[in-house]
Image (cartoon, grey):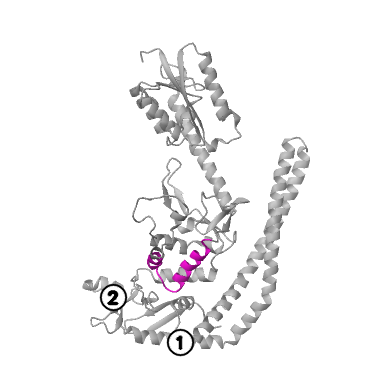
Amino acid sequence: MKSKTFNVALYIRLSREDGDNLESESITNQRDLLHLFLEKTEEKLVYIDEYVDDGFTGSNFDRPSWKRLMRDIENGKVNTIITKDLSRMGRDYISMGEYIERIFPEKGIRYIAINDDIDTLHETPGLEFLQFKLMFNDYYLKDTSKKIRKVLKSKKERGEFLGFKAPYGYLKDPSDKHKLIVDENIRPIIKKIFLLAYTGKSPRQIADIFSKEHIETPSVYANLNRGINNPTYNIWCPRTIEEMLTNETYIGNMTQGRRRKINYKSKKEIRTPKEQWIIKENTHEAIIDKKVFDTVGELLKKNKNKPTGNNIMLLSGFMVCRECNHKIGINKSSDGKRYYTHCSYYTAHSKYGLCTPHSLNYKKLENLVLEEIRKLCKEYVDSTTFKERIEEARKKNDIKVKKQVEISILEKKIRTNNSYIDKVYEDKLNGNIDIEMFNRLTARYKDEIISFKKRLESIEKENINSDKVDTDKDILEKINEYLSLEKPSRALLVNLIDKILISEDKTIKIHYKFKLY
């Protein structure tokens, strides 16, 4: 660099993880330090412009002011960059090394990091430890990201909503952004989605219905402008419908963690397995009844890989081959006059002689199964033992309500005691109380929390038995509904039947979701 005149860009960055309360890293302090450096230097450093990225992470260089700085470098406006230290420019080890050791030298850019004693024009001491500093900054980024994830996970486990936008059908509560309230404009749409699914419509059929009715998609309604120039911009996607039908948010359970970033340096997100979702029950108003939600979930499984036409057979998805444990499908005869069952595994591998056809007249099979279910249901209703259990459920109902109230009170007491512990700690730091008083108060509050939690565990164990009685009561309602109908719906069957086993010798065995007592 031959010129003795250096056109200077002052680069300032503050990320969210640095925290607004850290004055040493504040925008103002960085600016003051950089301008003081310019005033004191004896070199000919000409101030050109200031570039500020407030609230942007150091894990990447996807920042508006940094991009503007790079454009000004390309246009020859700037040939020197000054930052408070290396971490203000960035924390990613690989990208920082690329800029300082290749990009800047190739473009004739001088880089100065004041507090790290780095100046690429001179052999400053800081350059000898550059790689170590970059590695430490990268480690700090990783460690901070890990701590932030732990904090966020803890908040999610408490049922606090942390998303940028509320799920479709809900809004952020204006009085508390971590709580959800129902979006009354969308409530009827959510109900319609579940009603259509309950009556047997597949996600693709529901998506087609909504697209034809010109109902705004979630992204259009939220004004996200994704793919606005795409002809499918306002076309509903079956995957969107399916995700909504399996989202417990609609039954009042806060469901988060459905997606995660690949790592702390990438913005790309991937879907997480359901077992890794963070679900907190009863955090907000439900739009859909849990019984309807559970039934729809079962129907989705039964309807998997079925034709998208309007006529899904009543027993489709329930039938299983007893020999190979694969699904039994339904085909139409070549003359189109009758339907017959077939083992899907045999059909796919018939030339290898795997399994057997399991061919039965479907209509006769359906009548046989329905009659068998009706017969068993009558026996179930006539069971004296069962009636006694239902009477017991009614008696326990008042007790259960009282327990729910007690649970709410105990949870509130635990939260209150935790806040007391925080307050006592602050009092100790501020010198309002001595260490002896701090230890005594903290021990008392913690003992009370342990006592409250033990009582909660006891109530939860007691509720396991009462939930079983409620399940029996639900089954009775379904059975009575079944007996009152000439032909049941798939939604009703899914609450009564687990599967129907079909053997090659035409033996039929029905596995129910209930049993006689």
Q: Is residue 285 visible?
A: yes
Give the residue number, with chain letter if any, for mark 1. Answer: 486
Give the Cα separation between the discs numbered 2 and 1.
Answer: 35 Å
Identity of the residue drawn at 71% across and 46% down: 421
Q: Residue at x 46, y 42 (%)?
A: 264
**What is the secondary structure assignment of the residue under circle 1?**
loop
State the extent of the magenta-drawn residues as a range.
Answer: 185-209
- Depth check: 295 or 64 in front? 64
* Residue 364 image position (x, y, % from top left): 35, 87
Q: Position of residue 435 (x, y in %)?
A: 76, 38
Could you say which disc has been placed on residue 355 in the image? 2
Identify which residue, 473 or 240, lies in the foreground. 240
Q: Amino acid at mark 1?
A: Glu
Q: Main secondary structure of the magenta part?
A: helix
- Horizontal relation, residue 114 to residue 409: left or right: left
Sort mark 2 into few (<14), some (14-19) or many (20+) by Cα contacts within 10 Å.
some
Work out whether 216 lies above or below 349. Answer: above
- Residue 478: x, y in percent? 52, 80
Q: Is residue 183 left or right of residue 367?
A: right
Res 354 seen here: no
